[in-house]
Amino acid sequence: MGLLKTGINEVIATTAFNAAPIGVHVRDGTVSMILFSGTHTAENILRDGWVVANLVHDPLLYVKTAFEDLPRDAFVEEPVAGKTMCRLAEAEAWVAYTAQVEKNAAGTLRVVLTQEKEIIETVAVHPVNRGFNNLVDATVHATRYRENRDPELKKLLEYHTGIVRKCGGKKELAALDLLQQYIGDG
């Protein structure tokens, strides 16, 4: 399957000058994603029919794209399959897909992806860092917690925060501080 492997691959997905952390599901030869209806990502995919999965190892970028829009200069336009698609300027690698909504129900969209182009921009080795991995998990929980203040999500955030504080480096700790600002926790 190329750069993305079996399971759920956490990427920063880009559509038309929009970026958001998304899990790309790779199972049994099918590549897909589940999106919440009404998000910029879902609206852009419905309109344009494409998405780019950006592989990035910057914890601050994961947090920022979960809660705010990036400036236009954070994107690079790429010609792919007769369309102009946007990827992140900071992407270490990226995979461009055509995207077709397979199911639209109960506030979510299931989007099936067909790979059009895959590029490695830079080669870098990233040792497994539990701080980074837990920051990604905390970011996922924080997007939901900010909306509903669910106490169970708060417990998960506290758990992941503890691991980020124990295992993360300077960038992960800075990203955690930013995450806590977005959700209003100190």
Image (spheres, rainbow, N blue to C red):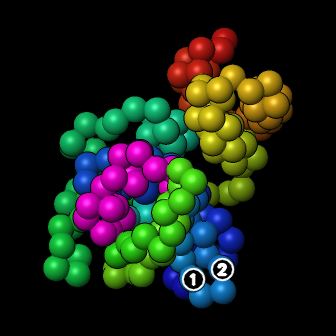
Quarter of the picture containing the N terminus is bottom right
Seen from the viewer's position, the closer of residues 103 and 152 is 103
| Residue at mark 2 | 27
Whole-percent x, y for residue 122 in the image: 41, 65
Taking the image as shown, residue 56 lies to the left or right of residue 25, namely left
Q: Secondary structure at mark 1?
A: strand
Q: Secondary structure at mark 2?
A: strand
Give the residue displayed 75% in from the left and 46% down from the top. Answer: 130
Whole-percent x, y for residue 172 in the image: 62, 35
Whole-percent x, y for residue 147 in the image: 59, 27
Q: Is residue 46 magenta?
A: yes
One can see residue 121 in this view: no
| Residue at mark 1 | 30
**Residues marked 1 and 2 touching at CB (< 8 Å):** yes
One can see residue 73 in this view: yes
Q: Residues within 10 Å of mark 1 (few under 14, many from 20)?
A: few
Q: Is residue 72 magenta?
A: no
Q: Which residues are magenta?
A: 35-51
Q: Which mark is residue 120?
A: none
| Residue 96 to residue 20: above or below | below
Image quadrant where residue 24 sits = bottom right
| Residue 1 to residue 166: above or below | below
